[in-house]
Image (cartoon, rainbow, N blue to C red):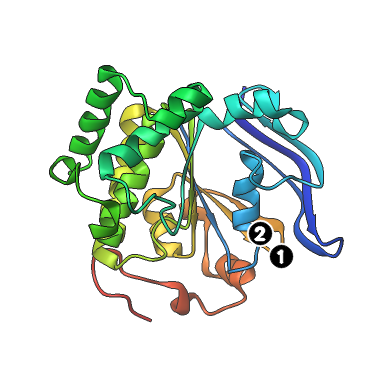
Amino acid sequence: MPILEFKNVSKTYDNETKALNDVSFSIEEGEFVSIIGPSGAGKSTLLRCINRLVDASSGEIVFDGQDVTQMKNKELRKVRTKTGMIFQHYNLVDRLSVIENVLHGTLGKKSTFSGMIGHYTEEEKLRAFEILESLGLADQAYKRCDELSGGQKQRVGIARAIMQQPKLILCDEPIASLDPKSSKIIMDHLADINENQKITCIVNLHQVDVAMKYSERIIGVSDGKIVYDGTPEGLDQKTIHKIYQSKTSDLITDIGGEAHE
């Protein structure tokens, strides 16, 4: 059984703007999937429909055997504990320390009172440190997040997501605000998490070459529709042009080096 299925999903904003148009696909557990497409294509909407940060207008979204579109608050909260999310602009609490932000990954499984008073077990604190160490951030644990670089903040976001012990990690443009060197570090960590922890990853990306380097499967979205779903090897220049309506050369960046055209 796939871990995620979209069945004829559409999303319309303000009764007129169609962000998703009859989208259907399925993702197997353990896959690393990149979703590519131009700004406004519907990538973020697609991702946010999975954990109901955005409600689909029609269709079914089946995650871990349950249709999330029909869930009430209690069921939805449980699903969200299984879906870690990494945001383009990090979504951290800047005035709190790195370790506190990582521990926030446990809040979905705690009572409201425990969450309000910041009660964490020794086991949770130890695990948070272990995750930070694996991401090269153990020495930053007690720094305020507003003292970190963009790449470090994104690694804190990854640590928080892993802290949830999710089945699925959703990454919404995780490297769009980063330089090439930091981008490579983030993508390497995501690939490592997928391979070694067997966590399914769905990553929204603008950079075609990054998607081709790291993904086993690419979904191309244009005007709210899927126009490509296949391997990186099958993504030719004609298909890239169909997705972006741009020259292929305009979309290439050299991750780990300098951007070029």
Q: Locate residue 18 relative to residue 28 in the image: left or right.
A: right
| Residue under the point 64% across and 67% down | 40
Q: Circles 2 and 1: CB distance less than 8 Å?
A: yes
Mark drawn on residue 223: 1
Residue on which disc 2 sits: 42
Residue at horizontal 66%, vertical 22%? 65
Of the 4 image quadrants, the one containing the C terminus is bottom left
Quick one: 103 or 46, which is closer to the camera? 103
Q: Amino acid at mark 1?
A: Asp
Q: Compared with residue 123, is residue 224 higher up or lower down, i.e. above or below?
A: below
Q: Disc 2 or 1, which lies upstream in sequence?
A: 2
For residue 86, say whether it is visible.
yes
As rendered, which of 109 and 6 lies closer to the eye?
109
Picture disc at residue 199: none
* Secondary structure under the numbered disc 1 in the rendered image: loop
Q: Quadrant of the N terminus?
A: top right
| Three-letter code, disc 2 | Gly
Determine which quarter of the picture holds residue 121.
top left
